[in-house]
């Protein structure tokens, strides 16, 4: 056989190396070798051989190349299987965390320009596992993995890091615009209905991303993307957040607030206060909203809006709601026993309360233990609850509670993204117009137009409307003329303790209102 015929037996990627070795042997610069080569048999079968060779020299010149060739195909295939098992996720077939770590280290060590990293979390996997079973959850993960790989194509590499978390390393060079575009396309593509285990599921993912800068190591890049994912999951689940340095301080602040709230709960420094809601036509109290201010260790009081980040933590939100339900039920029982006409009490509920799946049970059990009918309770939910991918769960839970007498209010209406859709599809009895529109409606035509639109829409849908943040008689008169149902704001009283509620109700007379902060002054007539 000629040398080219011999070289032709080697796999294409090996041939140039073999040619170079033959040239080096002939010019005397080569030495012995011991290495493995991939070859192709005349039948087209892939094999691996181990070549151990040396050079015989006469008078210092190469005269003969000799050695042995050993078939090591089985050994190589076994090693490949071991390597694949060590670097592949057994469920999805994607590269696993070990492969991800190795790939990241190689890229950063090689100073690859602008590495783009996306970390991806599959939303509500635990709910799928709990409700439909882990087998269905596994099928969901396989479906998401397949769609990620399909949609990404040759633009990068997908890894499954474990549980419900995936990552994507994008081919260089990465850019903020390109990463955002890819992330949004992945979110949209994966969100399409998926048939798994006889059920149709709409998968959802949340994505955090980061780009390497300068000589950034793999650990820092991963941490930055993790910060972005964490922030997205807490504030914009189902969307994409790109890392920015300020995220570190914002997350640190959130953690600090959560710890402060946990401490306040432990030390009983979170006690409900109640703000009156009055009828627009007669000025009589129709309800109170239960708010949850926090007393700091130094004695100062902060409103719930100042520690709203704590409500995104499922454990903290659960404990706050449990505490509020117990205390509100006890207060209602006390007012009923004292024959106080307080109407109903409204309580705010967060998305975390619906995620646990036990909200209905907790409400029913708490109020039943005090002998209180559920028609004394109003649940206030914001549009952010429905933007967490929980619309069906929320709607089902609220519908069951409404059948038991409870009223549902949609809070902060007009500040969300799909208000009209929610009004059509969700069980809502009361719309609360956000304070921001009431503040400006007398001086801004667009705000007034939105208020009028909501009132007209509610009238056609047979819903009631509460205007929040009413602070002047002019605002109250305007809302009365437009057909608003009830009003809430400092004009009628600031949030007050449970003890002050009794004083407030006893001080009021039909058709009159009184500033809760000045109960001894002459009452002021609200409407005419």
Image (cartoon, rainbow, N blue to C red):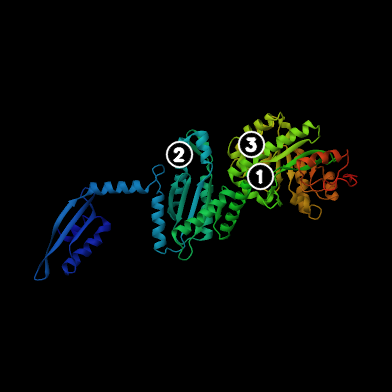
Residue 435 percent across, percent down from the top left: 75, 49
Q: Residue furthest bottom?
A: 59
Q: Residue at x 19, y 56 (%)?
A: 51
Contact flag, marks 2 and 3 (Cβ < 8 Å): no
Query: In the rendering, which numbered label is found on residue 395?
Result: 3
At numbered mark 2, what does the secondary structure look like: helix, strand or loop?
helix
Q: Is residue 231 visible in the rendered structure shown here?
A: yes
* Disc with the residue nearer the chain's start (1 vs 2): 2
Q: Is residue 347 above or below residue 436?
A: above
Identify the residue under disc 2: 138
Q: Is residue 163 left or right of residue 279?
A: left
Q: Is residue 78 above or below residue 366?
A: below
Separation of marks 3 and 1 at Cα, in angstroms: 12 Å
Question: How many discs appear?
Answer: 3
Alpha-carbon distance for marks 1 and 2?
Answer: 31 Å
Residue 92 appears left or right of 203:
left
Q: Quadrant of the C terminus?
A: top right
Q: What residue did someone put label 1 on?
A: 383
Image location of residue 269, percent across then percent down: 68, 45
User: Visible in this render: residue 239?
Assistant: no
Q: 279 above or below 6? A: above
Residue 293 x/y as whole percent: 70, 47
Task: Calculate the distance from the C-alpha at mark 2 to the C-alpha at mark 3.
Answer: 27 Å
Q: What residue is rendered at 18% in x and 65% in y?
A: 31
């Amino acid at each position: 056989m000629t040398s080219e015929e011999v070289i032709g037996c080697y796999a294409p990627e090996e041939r140039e190396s073999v040619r170079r070795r033959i040239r080096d042997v002939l010019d005397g610069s080569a030495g012995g070798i011991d290495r493995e080569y991939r070859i192709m048999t005349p039948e087209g079968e892939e094999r691996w051989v181990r070549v151990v060779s040396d050079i015989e020299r006469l008078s210092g010149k190469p005269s003969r190349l000799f050695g042995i060739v050993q078939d090591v195909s089985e050994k190589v295939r076994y090693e490949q299987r071991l390597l694949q098992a060590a670097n592949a996720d057994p469920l999805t077939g994607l590269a696993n965390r070990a492969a991800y770590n190795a790939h990241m280290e190689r890229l950063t060590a090689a100073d690859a320009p602008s590495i783009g990293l996306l970390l991806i979390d599959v939303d509500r996997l635990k709910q799928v596992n709990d409700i439909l079973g882990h087998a269905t959850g596994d099928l969901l993960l396989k479906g998401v993995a397949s769609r990620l790989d399909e949609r990404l194509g040759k633009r990068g590499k997908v890894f499954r890091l474990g549980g419900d978390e995936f990552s994507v390393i994008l081919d260089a060079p990465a850019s903020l615009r390109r990463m955002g575009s890819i992330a949004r396309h992945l979110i949209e593509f994966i969100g399409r209905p998926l048939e798994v285990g006889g059920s149709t599921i709409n998968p959802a993912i949340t994505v955090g991303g980061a780009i390497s800068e300068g000589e950034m190591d793999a650990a820092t890049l991963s941490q930055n993307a993790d910060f972005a994912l964490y922030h997205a999951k807490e504030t914009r689940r189902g969307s994409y957040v790109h890392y920015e340095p300020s995220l570190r301080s914002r997350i640190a602040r959130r953690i600090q607030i959560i710890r402060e709230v946990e401490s306040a709960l432990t030390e009983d420094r979170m006690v409900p206060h109640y703000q009156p809601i009055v009828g627009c036509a007669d000025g009589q109290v129709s309800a109170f909203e239960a708010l949850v201010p926090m007393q700091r260790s130094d004695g100062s009081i902060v409103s719930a809006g100042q520690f709203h980040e704590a409500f995104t933590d499922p454990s903290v939100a659960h404990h706050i709601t449990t505490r509020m339900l117990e205390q509100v039920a006890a207060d209602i029982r006390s007012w009923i026993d004292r024959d106080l006409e307080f109407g109903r009490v409204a309580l705010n509920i967060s998305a975390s309360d619906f995620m646990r799946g036990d909200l209905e049970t907790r409400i029913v059990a708490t109020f039943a233990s005090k002998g209180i009918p559920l028609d004394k309770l109003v649940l206030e939910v914001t549009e952010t609850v429905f933007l967490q991918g929980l619309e069906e769960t929320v709607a089902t839970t609220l519908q069951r509670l409404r059948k038991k007498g409870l009223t549902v209010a949609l809070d902060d209406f007009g500040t969300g993204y799909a208000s009209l859709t929610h009004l059509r599809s969700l069980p809502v009895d009361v719309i609360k117009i956000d304070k921001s529109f009431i503040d400006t409606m007398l001086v801004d035509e667009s705000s007034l137009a939105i208020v009028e639109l909501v009132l007209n829409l509610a009238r056609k849908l047979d819903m009631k409307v509460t205007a929040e943040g009413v602070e002047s008689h002019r605002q109250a008169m305007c809302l009365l003329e437009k057909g608003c149902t009830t009003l809430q704001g400092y004009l009628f009283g600031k949030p007050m303790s449970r003890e002050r509620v009794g004083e407030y109700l006893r001080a009021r007379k039909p058709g009159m209102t009184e500033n809760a902060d000045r109960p001894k002054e002459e009452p002021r007539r609200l409407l005419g």
